[in-house]
Image: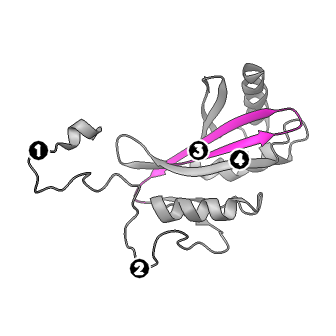
Amino acid sequence: MSKETLDLVHQKLNEHVHGAIISAELNFNFPSFTVQHDRVHAVLKFLKEDADLNFHFLTDLTGMQTTDEKHLGVIYHLHNMQRNMRVRIKTFFDINKPEVPTATDLWDGANWMERETYDFFGVRFKGHPDLRRILNVDEMDIYPLRKEYPLEDQTRDDKDDYKFGR
């Protein structure tokens, strides 16, 4: 079913949101699409509102940082429960301008997920109704899940960031 989902979604996105897809792949039998960050809202809206696709449920939304440490990304997991189809939408942008459109106008549940992503990665969701920290203290001026900080105490000589994947 997942290969069919990948082909169906890929075809419909190419027809209706032309030029938005950067890549499409099937990872562990899970259809995954990388889209342009300035077109992600149009893609999400189409996936939700299209009668055949009907991805009406936002399962998850989170942030991530790429291995080159210069880009951040947002990942959306969508689900069509009637046809049991799932899809992953990814978008990436420069760490110096971490901004994407909000999905709260499509799914109310995106509100707290976007706040959490902002809180830990610093991604600003344009148009979000109440974008502020949700788990960390308001006075915090860093984003703890960014790879900008050493993993260990720098005064120790027995620790090497390279051994921790950095």
Using the image, determine if residue 45 lies above or below residue 34: below
**Residue 103 image offset from top left, x and y in percent:** 70, 58
* 74 drawn magenta: yes
**Which corner quadrant holds the N terminus?**
top right
Q: Residues within 10 Å of mark 3 (few under 14, many from 20)?
A: some
Foreground disc of the pair 2, 3:
2
Q: Earlier in the sequence, mark 1 or mark 2?
A: 2
Is residue 122 visible in this depiction of the protein? no
Residue at the extreme bottom: 139
**Residue 41 image offset from top left, x and y in percent:** 69, 53
Q: Main secondary structure of the magenta part?
A: strand
Please give the label number shown on residue 59.
4
Distance between mark 1 and mark 2 Cα atoms: 33 Å
On the image, numbered disc 2 is attached to which residue?
139
Please give the label number shown on residue 135.
none
Please report the residue visible at 72 percent of the width from the left and 45 percent of the height from the top: 43
Q: Earlier in the sequence, mark 2 or mark 3?
A: 3
Distance between mark 4 and mark 1 Cα atoms: 42 Å
Q: Which amino acid type is marked by label 4?
A: Thr
On the image, numbered disc 3 is attached to which residue?
36
**Which corner quadrant holds the C terminus?**
top left
Distance between mark 4 and mark 3 Cα atoms: 21 Å
Q: Which amino acid type is marked by label 3?
A: Gln
**Residue 22 image offset from top left, x and y in percent:** 58, 35
Distance between mark 3 and mark 1 Cα atoms: 42 Å
